[in-house]
Image (cartoon, rainbow, N blue to C red):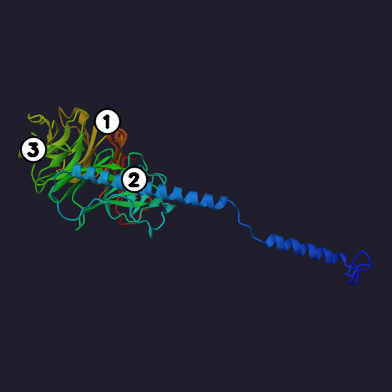
Amino acid sequence: MSAFPRLPDNLTGGLRRPNQVRRDQLEGAVRESLSRQVAVTRPLSADPAGQAIRRANRIRRRRAGAGVALGVVTTVLIGAGMTHLSGSSDQQGPPIVVIGDPDLSGRPLPTVSVAPPSYSPKTPTDVLVAGAVIDADGRRLALPGVGPAELAHRLPNGAGLLVVGAPTAAGRSLWVAQDDGLVQVLLAGAGQIVLAPDATQVAWRDGGDLLVAGVVGTQLIGTVRIAVPDRAEPVRFVGSSLLVRLDPNRPGHALWRPGADELAAVPEQDILNVYGSLPDGRLVSQVSANPSNGTCLAFVDPKRATKAARTACGTQVSPDGVGGMSDDGRWLLVNGKVGSTDRSLLVDLKRLDTKLDVVPVGPAVSGTIAWRGDSDVSYVDSSGRLVRVDVKRVRAGEQAEPVPVPGIEPGDRPVLVSGS
């Protein structure tokens, strides 16, 4: 017999712990046990999300470093190229060429509106007036930042305008205006500015130098320069060369092929004005004659030493230099005299070798002449009215009549857009 008393257990005397547990209490105990197990955080052997983020950061850092390196190399190459093209110029002072996109913050959004309905929406060509372009359908596109202008030309791709500013005390400006109304300054404080007929090049006077640059998009590239006499200024592009007037108050011109070290004098030294060039390179020019005959129109070969034949002479053609040729080189519109009245005149260049064949057209030209094709030309007269000329009707004796320009206020001076 054991010395210890026998203790009752579950097998002998019945259950000592309560077994009266309700169903809801049991479910609560199970839920609590499971929740405690879930709350215990166990470290993962691998973190896929963290690995992906770290890998993306490494790739981004490598790409950023490569981009910075490429930008530095590009900047150095462009700077070296511009230095090489600029030659050994000793030009001092602030540069006047602005290349690249300006800060666009704060610029007003471009706006498009329709010209006032009180005017006819039809115009023969696009018109620049009061800081806006009005197209042939009467739509108006505001160009914030464009000041008073004297010349506007469509870009080769038709995606905007080159606008030459009127002369001011600070010089002239050149703007490029895109079709969405964004305006960018290409030149400021320049002297005389000349555009190539296709608007792919621009020439200008800066201090004692003459410069030429290509126009690509909204930038000037490949600038070259040459030192010129004090009063010399660019006149127009002739093929791949630039015609330079050596002194505005005297006859005498020279040709400069951009990149060459010197000007090549034009042998014909009696040229007063040049209106354009023919496909063979000859210049349609106004040349001096004896006092009794006034001046003559002539075809001048700028590279030949022989004088041009002076057959188309008279006192009708004005010496103001205003004039423009048709696209086919057949017609020339110039200012002149009919009796004692200032008028615009149409000259038949096909007969220039034999005589001066001139017919009066309408009021005198004031500003740009815009030819469209071979027989339709428009210009603005001294009153700011638009004059549209049909060559066939004028040759038949019908005078061109000026009409108001749609959408402009009294006193505004419209500028016709060339190349439209």
- Indicate left or right for 42 with 60 as reference: right
Q: Position of residue 118 (x, y in %)?
A: 42, 53
Select label 1 or label 2 by which is in front: 2
Instruction: Please tell me whether mark 3 sits on a helix, a strand or a loop.
Output: loop
Residue at image mark 1: 328
Q: Residue 357 appears in which quarter of the rendering?
A: top left
Q: Which mark is residue 389?
A: none
> In this orientation, does residue 338 appear?
no
Residue at image mark 2: 70
Decide which of 383, 137 is in the foreground and name it: 137
- Indicate left or right for 76 with 3 as reference: left
Q: Position of residue 148 (x, y in %)?
A: 28, 54
Q: Amino acid at mark 2?
A: Leu
| Quadrant, the N terminus | bottom right
Q: Amino acid at mark 1?
A: Asp
Q: CA distance from mark 3 to mark 1?
A: 26 Å
